[in-house]
Amino acid sequence: MSNPTHVDDVAIGDEMIRLGQFVKLAGLLDSGGDAKAAIVDGDVSVNGEVDRRRGRQLHHGDIVSFAGRAARVCP
């Protein structure tokens, strides 16, 4: 997995968001089905570590990476 050089800030408007929702919101993947598959397959990382749980709770400052792109959870 490559390290992204640029991290996009994505506002969630709440205290937390689930990983599957954030991947779609951030535009890292277009559909819920694609997000689920990528997460379960271990292609998505949170703060540099693979996490296969779609329901993982993300909080402000967490960084999600997929396919060389990254997005930071922001208020």
Image: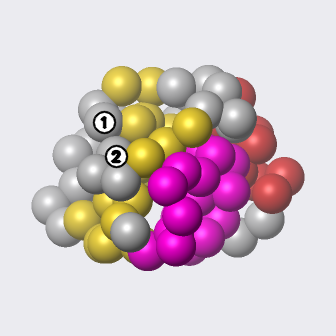
Q: Quadrant of residue 75?
A: bottom left
Furthest residue in direction front, as rendered:
15
Furthest residue in direction right, as rendered:
33
19 and 70: which one is in front?
A: 19
3D distance between C-alphas at marks 1 and 2? 6 Å
Residue type at the position of mark 1 = Asn
Report whether 34 appears left or right of 10. Answer: right
Report the magenta residues as a range.
11-29
Q: Quadrant of the N terminus?
A: top left
Residue 26 in sight in this render: no
Disc 1 vs disc 2: Cβ atoms closer than 8 Å? yes
Mark 2: give few (<14), some (14-19) or many (20+) Cα within 10 Å: some
Picture mark count: 2
Residue 55 in sight in this render: yes
Q: Quadrant of residue 55?
A: top right
SS class, disc 1: loop
Residue type at the position of mark 2 = Asp
* Residue 8 image point, x, y percent: 30, 72
Q: Nearer the viewer, mark 1 or mark 2?
A: 2
* Residue 10 image point, x, y percent: 41, 72
Q: Is residue 58 above or below residue 28?
A: above
- Residue placed under numbered mark 2 in the picture: 62
Residue at image x 40%, y 37%?
Answer: 46
- Residue placed under numbered mark 1 in the picture: 47
Report whether 5 appears left or right of 55. Answer: left
Mark 1: give few (<14), some (14-19) or many (20+) Cα within 10 Å: few
14 and 34: which one is in front?
A: 14
* Residue 58 image point, x, y percent: 49, 43
Name the mark on residue 4. none
Furthest residue in direction left, as rendered:
5
* Residue 35 image point, x, y percent: 70, 51
